[in-house]
Image (cartoon, rainbow, N blue to C red):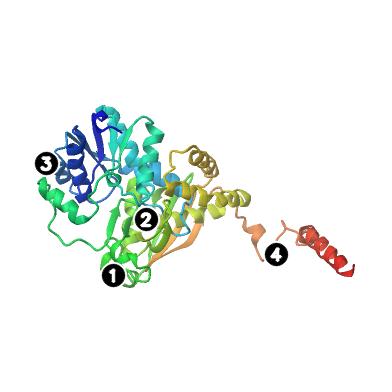
Amino acid sequence: MDKKDVKKIVLAYSGGLDTSVILKWLQVNYGCPVVAYAADIGQEEDWEAVRQKAMDTGASQVYIQDLKEEFARDFCFPMFRANAIYEGVYLLGTSIARPLIAKEQIEIARKEGADAVSHGATGKGNDQVRFELTYMALEPSIKIIAPWREWDLNSRSKLIDFANQHNIPVPVTKKKPYSMDANMLHISYEGGILEDPWAEPPKDMFTWTVDPEDAPDKPTYIEIGFEKGDPVTLDGNPLTPAKMLSALNEIGASNGVGRVDLVENRFVGMKSRGVYETPGGTIIRTAHMALESITLDREVMHIRDGLVPKYSELIYYGFWYAPEREMLQTMIDKTQERVTGTVRLKIYKGNCMVVGRKSPYSLYQPEFATFEEDEVYSQKDAEGFIRLQGLRLRIRSMLEDRSENY
């Protein structure tokens, strides 16, 4: 790509060291206006300070987009309807945010008449893939600029030198010995002191959840009401998706719920150790699965469960806007038509325990399941059922016996 062909760039901007340097680097190296865009998806930021820093660094325009409700409603909740989880542990808090950030970036590029977009993801991680697959899916002709794959600023000291050279303010604070990413679904910690998979994360690293050992000695009971697979009420009070997630975050965090420590397989091929806090998401997934246990047909549930690893992988890899994810979502949403009801949970010292579930569409019928006397089930019927299930096993055994006698 000839740099002279680029007329205007929209940069996904956070206000941190990397994207602040990128903002100026793009202006210097591409010689065109650069629009700074920041997505508010629930991370705690001084957004006016972010805006001012971008303007001071030379941005031609600054957008601060409040995407919290859209994030919860159109990205997190569809994912929860699928009980998505990557490699059995990770609730995809970073993965699910990237397609929304990139989608809004493309919309701003259209509004601004920009012909290029840029991001601050490195060439080693998953985020570069997630951003760029979304760009390609939504605006195939857009030019993509990934500075980490172009420049020679390959160390923190070089970034700071560039920032000082161009009068970009750099916080004079001790760098945390790990990297963090936050939104209203989770906080992640990677790198630095966590690169040794044998080392226990330091207690003071966690910024959101209370250590389970220090959590209250009295359990918290809550009731979550669902409609068609989505949580809609908390203790009987209707809440919007973002407010629901925020309220459950507060409950979960104060009780030490949602911490995980894993070594995951990145899409680019390497293994990476990550530590995550996902308090509200952990509660929603636990409650949702409990409600499905009484409302989903057995075979429907088993087929859907067999597809969850693939669905989760698609999100992790960045294929949110791919036809296969959309197809799976349609099927999953079909299964949710009667996932309506209430789940009661006991939250206590890092644990989220289901203690009750009910639904007007419950397939659980006590008169069939009871160990007491009943009039709806003949236990003698089980004999024929078992004999038919075992027929192929008997035939196989008979054949092996004959083979031994030859």
Disc 1 versus disc 4: distance between alpha carbons? 54 Å
Looking at the image, do the residues carrying marks 2 and 3 touch, with CB atoms under 8 Å apart? Answer: no
Pointer 4 residue: 373
Give the mark, 3 or 4, whose residue is nearer the N terminus: 3
The residue mark sitting in front, 2 or 3, is 3
Pointer 3 residue: 56
Pointer 1 residue: 203
Disc 2 versus disc 3: distance between alpha carbons? 37 Å
Identify the amino acid type marked 3. Asp
Q: Residues within 10 Å of mark 2 (few under 14, many from 20)?
A: many
The residue at the far right in this view is 406
Give the mark, 2 or 1, whose residue is nearer the N terminus: 1
Pointer 2 residue: 280
Q: Is residue 240 left or right of residue 87?
A: left
Residue 91: image x %, image y %? 41, 55
Q: Residues within 10 Å of mark 1 (few under 14, many from 20)?
A: few
The residue mark sitting in front, 2 or 1, is 1
Q: Is residue 207 left or right of residue 196?
A: left
Looking at the image, do the residues carrying marks 1 and 4 touch, with CB atoms under 8 Å apart? Answer: no
Disc 2 versus disc 1: distance between alpha carbons? 21 Å
